[in-house]
Amino acid sequence: MNKDQEIVVIYADGACKGNPGPGGWGAWIRMGEHSKELCGGEPITTNNRMELMAVIKALEALKRSCPVKIYTDSVYVQKGMSEWLTSWKARGWRTADKKPVKNDDLWRQLDTLAQQHQIEWLWVKGHAGDLGNERADELANRGVAQVMQG
């Protein structure tokens, strides 16, 4: 197996019909020749929570510690993990203006999962023809549809 095949590539996306409203998350995981699709949703949620949940569910699906590239069209997720998280933790899960961090339950869960891997957080422009992002978006919308069908 060559070095490139050892890297897990995750495309993650969230979707919401109304914000808050019914929401879905989707993740497309690839490693070498293998791939896996995941999706789900919640009846009342927000887009940001679904963006976070997509990454959480993808990382939960990994069976061992490995190098991971995570592609997200959410600046919130990408900057949260690569820029803001350390400061939030240092301030006791408070923002720079001393307000509680929104969605800290999911951020804490994601932080714990992320520590098990070597992750590169990459932002990709949404709805711009990126194959992986389009696939993750389809999965997130499938998650919304499942919730709305009951």
Image (cartoon, rainbow, N blue to C red):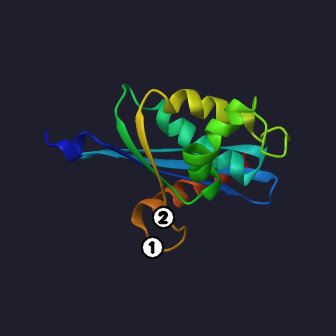
Q: Position of residue 69 (x, y in %)?
A: 39, 47
Q: Nearer the viewer, residue 133 or 65?
A: 65
Residue at image coords 66%, 36%: 107
Q: Are marks 2 and 1 in contact (CB under 8 Å)?
A: yes
Residue 40 in view, yes or no: no
Q: Position of residue 149 (x, y in %)?
A: 71, 50
Q: SS at mark 2?
A: helix
Residue at image coords 82%, 53%: 20
Q: Can you tell which quarter of the image residue 65 is in? A: top left
Q: Can you tell which quarter of the image residue 35 is in? A: top left
Q: Residue tagged by mark 1?
A: 129
Residue 9 in view, yes or no: yes
The quadrant of the rendering that contains the C terminus is: top right
* Label 2 to label 1: alpha-carbon separation: 7 Å
Under mark 1, the amino acid is: Gly
Farthest residue in the left direction? 1
Rendered position, 12 above or below 90: below
Q: Would you say 44 lies left or right of 11 here?
A: right
Q: Position of residue 116 (x, y in %)?
A: 45, 26
- Say the numbered circle drawn on residue 134: 2
